[in-house]
């Protein structure tokens, strides 16, 4: 089992920045590919970014390549998502997910463990 806990969300003004954290416990964090997904109000969950077990390989949703940065620090069992130039459209619950393999990609079905999510609200 892997337990994931997100933090770092909150209410921010448009144009600001946030760094979301996802802290893992349980099985060895460094073995797993990780990802961030988000669910805007009234919409389906969508892929944001993924990172492989070592942190070398990353992937982003096309619309998020410019302002989102995924990273990880295996020594601290922590996954990060930096969001810059926030927009009201970024308002969503952001969740981290862990796969059972070194790399899982963009599909939510390929992730086994999920956190509860952290709310990000961007006001104009």
Image (spheres, rainbow, N blue to C red):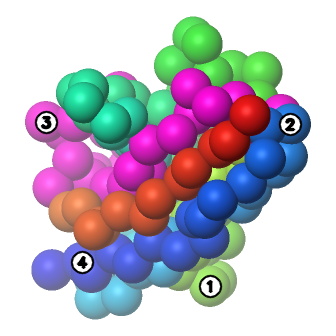
Q: Do labels 3 and 4 touch, CB within 8 Å?
A: no
Of marks 3 and 4, which one's residue comes earlier in the chain? Answer: 4
**Residue that label 1 marks:** 76
User: Which of the 4 quarters of the picture holds residue 116?
Assistant: bottom left
Q: Which mark is residue 15?
A: 2
- Spatial CA distance of label 2 from label 1 is 29 Å
Q: Do labels 2 and 4 touch, CB within 8 Å?
A: no
- Spatial CA distance of label 4 from label 1 is 14 Å
Q: Which mark is residue 109?
A: 3
Query: Is residue 119 in sight in this rendering?
Result: yes
Quarter of the picture containing the C terminus is top right
122 relative to 45, above or below: below
38 relative to 115, above or below: above
Q: Residue at x 15, y 80 (%)?
A: 1
> Secondary structure beneath disc 3?
helix
Magenta residues span 85-112
**Residue that label 4 marks:** 2
- Spatial CA distance of label 1 from label 3 is 26 Å
Number of numbered tags placed on the structure image: 4
Q: Residue at x 46, y 59 (%)?
A: 119
> Secondary structure beneath disc 1?
helix
Of marks 2 and 1, which one's residue comes earlier in the chain? Answer: 2
- Spatial CA distance of label 2 from label 3 is 32 Å
What x and y, as percent, mark residue 73?
Answer: 66, 71
Of marks 2 and 4, which one's residue comes earlier in the chain? Answer: 4
Q: Residue furthest top?
A: 62
Q: Residues within 10 Å of mark 3 (few under 14, many from 20)?
A: few
Residue 88: within the magenta? yes
């Amino acid at each position: 089992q892997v337990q994931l806990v997100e933090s770092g969300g909150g209410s921010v003004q448009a144009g600001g920045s946030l760094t979301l954290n996802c802290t893992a416990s349980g099985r060895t964090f460094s073995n797993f590919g990780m990802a961030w997904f988000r669910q805007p109000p009234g919409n389906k969950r969508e892929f944001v970014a993924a990172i492989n077990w070592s942190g070398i390989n990353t992937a982003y949703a096309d619309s998020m390549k410019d302002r989102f940065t995924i990273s990880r620090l295996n020594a601290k069992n922590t996954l990060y998502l930096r969001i810059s130039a926030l927009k009201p459209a970024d308002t969503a619950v952001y969740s981290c997910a862990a796969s059972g393999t070194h790399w899982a990609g963009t599909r939510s079905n390929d992730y086994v463990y999920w956190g509860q999510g952290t709310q990000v609200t961007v006001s104009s």
